[in-house]
Amino acid sequence: LRMKEQAMAWGATQVVNVRMETTNIGTNSNGIEVIAYGTGIR
């Protein structure tokens, strides 16, 4: 949702080619980090 909100703030009407990456946080932790990015278009 944050990606969509930021794209709209920059004047984009859509976000295309969205990609997601995940990373484990720590070696003994159950936490993960999720990063999503894409291209905003008008």
Image (cartoon, grey):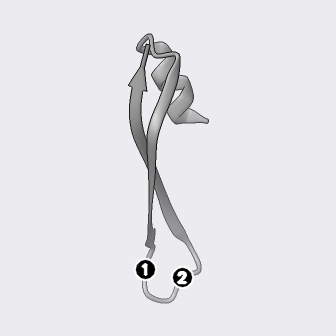
Q: Position of residue 12 (x, y in %)?
A: 46, 16
Under mark 2, the amino acid is: Ser
Residue 30 appears left or right of 17 = right
Q: Which residue is mark 2?
A: 29
Under mark 1, the amino acid is: Gly
Say which mark, if any, is on residue 26. 1
Q: Mark 2: give few (<14), some (14-19) or many (20+) Cα within 10 Å.
A: few
Q: Where does the N terminus fall, quadrant-wise? A: top right
Q: Position of residue 26 (x, y in %)?
A: 43, 80
Gap in Å between the C-alphas at discs 1 and 2?
5 Å
Q: Position of residue 28 (x, y in %)?
A: 50, 89
Say which mark, if any, is on residue 35. none
Q: Mark 1: give few (<14), some (14-19) or many (20+) Cα within 10 Å.
A: few
**Who is closer to the viewer here, 1 or 42?**
42
Q: Where does the C terminus fall, quadrant-wise? A: top left
Q: Position of residue 8 (x, y in %)?
A: 51, 17
